[in-house]
Image: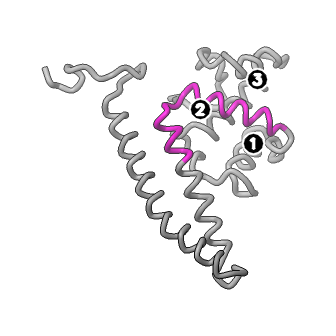
Amino acid sequence: MIQRQDSKLSIWEEHPDLISGVIADLYKKDKTKGKKRSSSIMWCIVMIYDDESKYYNLPKDGVEGKFAIVFGDFLKDEEFYQKNKELVDELGLYYEKLCSTPAKRHLKSIEELLDNRTKYLNENKYTMLPSIKEAVEFDKLVVNTDKLTETYEKAVKRLSNEKETRVKGNAKRSLSDNDDI
């Protein structure tokens, strides 16, 4: 995780270790002075994809979505994501792999599934279901949401345990870190 999110500073100077993979491609292709444009884009990626960012839990799309807000506020281009969807998705995915643990990525996938399920349940009412069979399937979906929520809670607990057992550099805590010796 990026500890400092000051988009006025060059991300490349603050976090040169990010310059790898597809992020390195963004960096190398930037011809602006001080690589300012790619730095601004990368700060937006951090604000959108870093799970410690204040924008992280906003919905992705729409006028109130994090893509429009972040790219609008920091690049002055609310449509940046639509115009550069493939690039942003690729950078975001790589950033998450670089900075997140498997447990965090798993938790995120469950969160997205729960969000999609909730959206579906809210959009589809019994009165809109054309058959009894679909009503039965709808009921199963509602009941299984509790199981999915339990899975989510277990993933949160595992992640919490993971955070407690790790220190700087993602190393395991030693006995002295835990005050056991």
Labels 3, 1: front one: 1
On the image, the x and y values in percent for residue 181 come to 13, 20
| Quarter residue 98 falls in | top right
Give the mark nearer the N terminus: 3 vs 2: 3
Q: Secondary structure at mark 3?
A: helix
Range of magenta residues: 84-109
Element class at badge 2: helix
Q: Which residue is mark 3?
A: 36
Residue drawn 63% across the image and 72% down it: 122
The residue at the point 77 percent across, 45 percent down is 72
Q: Is residue 179 left or right of residue 117?
A: left
Circles 3 and 2, Cβ within 8 Å, touching? The answer is: no
For discs 2 and 1, the disc positioned in front in the rendered view:
2
Q: Which mark is residue 114?
A: none
Q: Callout 2 environment at 10 Å: few (<14), some (14 to 19), or many (20+)?
A: many
The residue type indicated by label 2 comes to Glu
Question: How far apart are labels 2 and 1 at the CA level?
Answer: 18 Å
Label annotation for residue 96:
2
Q: Residue furthest left?
A: 181
Which quarter of the figure has residue 130? bottom right
Residue 172 position, x and y percent, is 33, 22
Return the disc, 2 or 1, that comes first in the chain's sequence. Answer: 1
Q: Is residue 41 left or right of residue 11?
A: right
